[in-house]
Each structure stands twice: as C-alpha cells, then as structure tokens.
Image: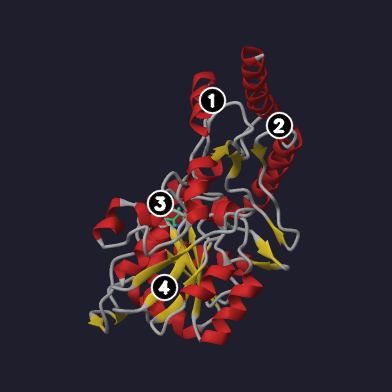
Amino acid sequence: MIPIAKPQISNEEIRAVTDVLKSGMLAQGKIVEKLEQEFASYIGVKYAIATNSGTSALHTALAAVGITKGDEIITTDFSFVASATCALMQNAKPVFCDIDPTTYNISTEDIEKKISKKTKAILPVHLYGQSCDMDTITEIARDHDLWVVEDACQAHGAEYRGKKVGAIGDVGVFSFYPTKNMTTGEGGIVTTNDEKIAERAKMFRSHGQSKQYVHEFLGFNYRMTNIAAAIGLAQLGHLDERNKRRQENATFLVEKLHNVAGIICPSVNPNGVHVFHQFTIRIEDEFPLSRDGLCNHLKEKGVGFGIHYPTPIHKQPLFKKLGYTDDHVDCPIAAEMSKRVLSLPVHPQLTADDLRFIVQTIHNVVREEQWMSA
Ligand SMILES: *Cc1c(COP(=O)(O)O)cnc(C)c1O
C-alpha cells in the first residue's frame, strides 16, 4: 500500500525529543522559543507564536486581531472545516465564498460580493500548498479596511511574488499535523509583523496572562510543548529539501497524467511557488470511470488517495444546524469540485517505483475500461 501521507521521522527527531525528556523541561520553554525564532526567520516575519494545533493557531489569530461577537469573516467554502469554525470560536460568523475552478482557491470576485458592514476580516486558505491571489485580496482588504488572516496550514514554504505565504497578510497560520509538509506531532504557529498582534496572541495562548497570575482577558491553554518543538526544529531544517521532492514528484505525475482524457492536473500559478501539500486531480466526464469508481480501483490496487474535500463546509451538519442553507450560500463551483477532486500521493518518501506504479494503475484502468466498452 502506497500511503497518501507519511511523516518523515529520523534519528534527528528521536535524539532531539530524548534530549528534551532528559532535560525535564517538557512544557513550553526555550525549545519552543527557538522554533518560533527559526520559523519566523524562515517565513520572513518578525514574530511567530507556537500553539498546540493549527486550529488553536487560527483561533488565536482571530482573537489577536480583535474578532468578536457579531463580526463576519469571509472565507472559502472549500477547505478543512477549521478554516470556518475558528470564526465561531470567537462568536463571529463565517461567510462563505465560492472558488476559482483552476486553483480551487477562494474566488476574489466572490469576496467583493460578500462584504457587508459587519465584515472584519478575509481568511484566504492557500489550498493544497498554493498561494491565493494575494494582490487582489490585499487590495480588497485595504479598500474595505479589513484584516487579512492567511490560513497557510497547507503551505509551509509556498511563495507569492517572491514572498512566503504567512508573511503577506496581517497574520498567518500554519499547522504541524503529521500529514502536513512539516510536523510536530500536533502543533501550529501564528506569524505576524505586528507587535500588538503578536503580544495579544501570546497572551491568548496562555489564559490571557500578562504576567504570572494576572489575566487580562479570556484565553486558553494553547501552548506547545518543548517535546513537540524539538520535532519541529528538526523538521524545519529539512522543509525546503522535502518541498523540492514534492515538486519533483508533482512534475512527474503531471508529465504522465496530463494526456489522460478526463483528468485535469493541478495548475501552477506562475507568480508563485507551489509546495504540493496535496497533488489533487479532477475527474471530468470523459474519464471512463466516475471519481468514486477510480477511488475503488486505487484502493484495490493499493494506491492511497484522499478526497479534499468531499463536502463544502457550509453543507456540514454543524452549519446546517446554524441555519446555513444552499439558498443563501451560493457556491456552485465548490459543490461541483467536491464531487470531482481526488488527491494522489505526492509526499517526499515516494520512490521512483511508487510513482510509476501510481501512474500505471491509472493508465491500466483506462485501457481496461476502453477495452470493455469497445
Ligand atoms: C490542517 C488544517 C487546519 C487545522 O490544523 P490542525 O493542526 O489539524 O488543527 C486548518 N486549515 C487547513 C486548511 C488545514 O489543512
């Protein structure tokens, strides 16, 4: 079985974790600070604030810019659910936009249409490892006096016009979940150049504490452990080389699959650097099998895959219960893509044989189906 994701853990991580365990300083401390400094410098921002998940980092980012009850946050209908639930965590309301069918990222035309008097922030998601159209988003935000909170949970190292994502908006958010381009087990981090946002994020992560046992506002325990940070430091050192492997794997897959009728390969925006957190193809009607038919075939042959994502966020039971209906959330492209997308393995641990097996499995099923229908 070729897995869709595989975290790469070597003796370096094991040694680093062992050192922390032996030191006795397990909770947030010097090692977390070191990860924050190195990650900030990697992204090209002044401040980074580590947390215990990407989700808690999203919540922290919204709290730190002052999102509160009744505010509206504009985000995409086509992402992991946390891109929208973070607004609910601050008693704010996510407002969903449709997507661009070539990149699957938020449609900037739709953002303009969804702005109201209550809108306080735009939360673009750099889906699959590719930056959103940040020039347009930044311009819209400037015109309407809105915060830009980048969900870069899938885009460690991705760039847009020479700048790393997470350094373009007012604040950026990354996840270190094991399937992501780098991991700390569970973990996340907030990035910003704004000293006030950084200060509030730090306090929010630790019970709104300004100094020991002084609590200025409601916060949580969102702290990262030194154990997790030790893993993260080792991972960060390999991020560029592993992203390069992902890009090479993606290039191979595109080369071998772009001619298959009914398969649309990922398109790479020439203004940026795509880090291929996922390699997501789209299955069109000309393909001899449905998307789900192809999934069954891949499963049978031992090729891992993922559907990112099978359900637009506003159609989740959670949002239905909150009164979101298809009548007032109109995102037809997201709905269509959720039925057609399919992610293939692209992670850096794939061998040349794995890659050949993935494309051969797809070529074979096309040949079989054509033969049967002839
Ligand atoms: C992974 C992910 C998150 C959440 O990160 P966790 O570390 O799992 O909490 C949020 N948004 C996107 C787009 C993600 O891919």
**Whether residue 104 is visible:** yes
Residue appearing at x 34%, y 74% in the figure: 204
Q: Secondary structure at mark 1?
A: helix
Q: Secondary structure at mark 2?
A: loop
Q: Which residue is mark 1?
A: 298
Q: Nearer the viewer, mark 2 or mark 1?
A: 2
Q: Position of residue 337 (x, y in %)?
A: 52, 47
Q: Is residue 159 above or below residue 176?
A: below
Q: Amino acid at mark 3?
A: Glu
Q: Classify 10 Å Cα crowding around label 1: few (below 14), some (14-19), many (20 and above).
A: many
Q: Report if the beta carbon of the residue with label 4 is closer than 8 angstroms to ligand 1.
A: no
Q: Secondary structure at mark 3?
A: loop
Q: Classify 10 Å Cα crowding around label 4: few (below 14), some (14-19), many (20 and above).
A: many
3D distance between C-alphas at marks 4 and 1: 38 Å
Determine whether label 2 and label 4 are within 8 Å by CB: no
Q: Which residue is mark 4?
A: 73
Whichever of callouts 3 and 4 sits on the residue coming sooner in the sequence is 4
Determine whether label 3 and label 4 are within 8 Å by CB: no
Q: Amino acid at mark 2?
A: Val
Q: Which residue is mark 3?
A: 186
Q: Amino acid at mark 4?
A: Ile
Q: Nearer the viewer, mark 3 or mark 4?
A: 4
